[in-house]
Image (spheres, grey):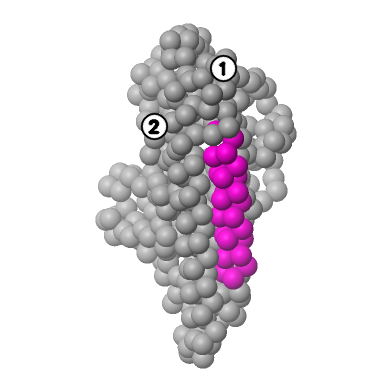
Amino acid sequence: MKNNFCPPEFFLGANTPYGFFSIFNQLYTPGTNWFCHILKGGPGTGKSTLMKNVAEKASKKKIKHEIIRCSSDPESLDAVILTDLNKCIVDGTAPHVIDPTYPGISDEIINLGEFWDSKALKEKEKIIIPICKENSRLHQMSKHFLATFGYAYNEISRLVQETINLDKLNNFCKSNSKKLIKKISSENKNEKLRFISSVTPKGYIFLSETLESLCEKIFIIDDPYSTVGNIILQNLRLHALNLNYEVISCPSPFLPAQHIEALLLPDIKLGFAVKNQFLPQDTFKSLKAEYKIIHTKRFLNKEKLLINKNLIKFNSKICKEFLRESSNALFTAKKIHDEIESIYSASMNYSKVNKITQKLLHF
């Protein structure tokens, strides 16, 4: 999708130490003036291609929208949110199963599985079932690796929390929040949740271009342990919400129910992101927008940190090893999924899918 319009890209589901963590309930609010088209159908039925076509047209027409990528395959889409039109299109299949809440009023199902040749697929039953099982086994293996990562990650957090100078950190958070977010917004805005990173077949990736698409000024919080950064972001978040700003909070895929790793304030084009030890070193180096670095080691007690240095280093090594193995399992699963898609694609009547696409492109 190469054009001059750059929509923000996020995930609405992430692979985490606690399994697949979904925030697809953030997609739209049933019963309001939103409408959601829910795509059903197996692999290779054209769901992602359909959504890419919709996103392509929205970009060309400068219609405000968001692209939701798939954590199991970042090249594929899970959803497109047409913000200006109060409309969204989503892949409603596992692991983020979505069904209509108010069918025909707020949402509808579009079953692309109607357009495959069931007879042709049945003839390939002995090929399809074993590779589907292998794909599931690899995803399960990835989950086990991430679960082990989670134990070591939580231990690092516990050890680092013991070294934080809370008085110094709290004073910084208070003054920093007031300095950066001053004016009260005239409207009471809502908070949105979005993942901006995920563990994928390509490794642990952070969608840094999204920062630039929404923010003109960015602060990178250099925090190898992801602990101090979360405290800074939580304080900024509460301050922005109290001043009625639109807030986009991005949970960490490592501790999604408790930690956030990025905070975006589109009203004032201001963004914050945590740079942890698991991200590639060049993750934020390509940013063209103005950015500053907040160093977090100044909030840690050096003597206490030194006592736990070897244990933190040991757990960090475990984390990196198991994070890599989790991505490797997803990479192999993706290759198998591509095989499954090719089988289903050969059995699809895409001329009928194209008719559905054309209907959804009428905006």
**Is 325 on the left-hand or right-hand side of 193?**
right
Q: Quadrant of residue 208?
A: top right
Residue at x-position 38% and y-position 44%: 26
Residue bearing mark 2:
191
Question: Where does residue 170 sit, x and y in percent of width and height?
Answer: 43, 13
Please say if 144 is above or below 133: above
Residue 302 is tagged as 1
In the rendered image, residue 267 lying in the magenta stretch gets the answer no
| Identity, as a three-letter code, of the amino acid under mark 1 | Lys
- The residue that appears at 52% across and 69% down in the rendered structure is 135
Q: Is residue 136 above or below residue 274?
A: below
Q: Are marks 1 and 2 in contact (CB under 8 Å)?
A: no
| Residue 136 seen anywhere in this rendered image of the structure | yes
| Mark 2, other Cα within 10 Å: few <14 / some 14–19 / many ≥20 | some
Front position in the image: 327 or 149: 149
Dot 1 or dot 2: first in sequence order is: 2
Tell me which segment is drawn in magenta: 312-337
Give left or right: position of 57 versus 148.
right
Tag 2: amino acid:
Glu
Per the model, the C-alpha gap separating discs 1 and 2 is 36 Å
Image coordinates of residue 124 in percent, x first then y, are 53, 87
Q: Nearer the viewer, residue 83 or 72?
A: 72
**Residue 289 position in % (x across, y down):** 68, 26
